[in-house]
Amino acid sequence: AQSVTQPDIHITVSEGASLELRCNYSYGATPYLFWYVQSPGQGLQLLLKYFSGDTLVQGIKGFEAEFKRSQSSFNLRKPSVHWSDAAEYFCAVGGASGGSYIPTFGRGTSLIVHP
Amino acid sequence: DGGITQSPKYLFRKEGQNVTLSCEQNLNHDAMYWYRQDPGQGLRLIYYSQIVNDFQKGDIAEGYSVSREKKESFPLTVTSAQKNPTAFYLCASSSKTGYTFGSGTRLTVV
């Protein structure tokens, strides 16, 4: 069975500081990996995804993530955080099933940004 | 613009009543999904449908029902059998490039 662990429930950073959100997964084959962001009371927006190829993936809003198979990790990074980045972040792992994708989501990491 | 529309954004119902949440997409996606979100628990899959007139139970299907009569529509009914229905409900659809989510419906049962 596939699973995702986001070990940090909350992360607090100062504006302008660097950010790394951790994600560890369990999956039997090469996984499809995703990071989503959710603002309060809103749906989820896709930040980036990894299907294959280059293990360093660039996303929107200046985010990137690196797939490390040996560590079963897909950590999200940003070099300089902006106050508008404060939100809930979800990592997800999944694979193809009948042509669609049914990811399993982590419990989320809440990012707090101090001015 | 293509996307997913969930309505209403807020919904209040009395305990014991069934309620139906709407989800419509104009992305031409075959697959659609319903998730429930509770604080600190991430997203849990209720039902999904990969094609019209077919759907499958997810991890927490008890007390919920769905239909998929049209490709664009995947309504979710929260029945009186659902013991703790107050939650934030998210609908999604998918293609090979990933998921697209609606903006959610917050259901409060009083």
Image (cartoon, rainbow, N blue to C red):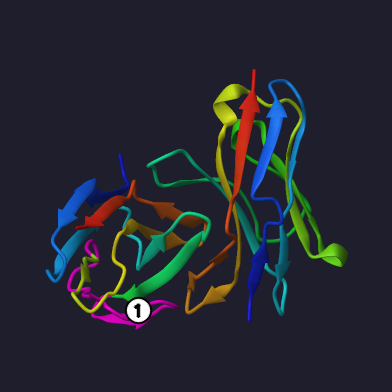
* In the depicted structure, whether residue B110 falls above or below residue A63: below
Query: Does the magenta portion include B30?
Result: no
Q: Nearer the viewer, residue A111 or B108?
A: B108
Q: A102 above or below B37?
A: below
The x and y percentages for residue B31 are: 37, 68
Asked if residue B55 can be seen in this view, the reply is yes
Which span of residues is magenta-colored? B52-73
Query: Which residue is found at the position 32% from the left and 76% from the top?
Result: B51
Quadrant containing the N terminus of chain A is bottom right
* Above or below for B62 versus A83: below
Task: Describe residue A33's horizontal placement relative to residue A43 as left or right.
Answer: right
Name the residue at the front extreme: B110
Q: Is residue A89 left or right of residue B99?
A: right
Name the one closer to the observer, B40 or A69: B40
**At 16% from the left edge and 64% from the top edge, which residue is drawn?**
B20
Q: Is residue B65 magenta?
A: yes
Element class at badge 1: loop
- Residue under pointer 1: B61
User: Residue B94 at x, y = what percent?
Assistant: 43, 61
Query: What is the count of numbered marks?
Result: 1
Badge 1 sits on which subunit?
Answer: B
State the image coordinates of residue A41 (x, y, percent, origin top left): 38, 42
Q: Is residue B91 left or right of residue A68?
A: left
- State whether residue B25 appears in this view: no
- Does A81 sit left or right of B1 as displayed? right
Of residues B72 and A33, the one nearer the viewer is A33
Instruction: Tell me what residue is drawn at x 40 percent, y 47 percent.
Output: A43
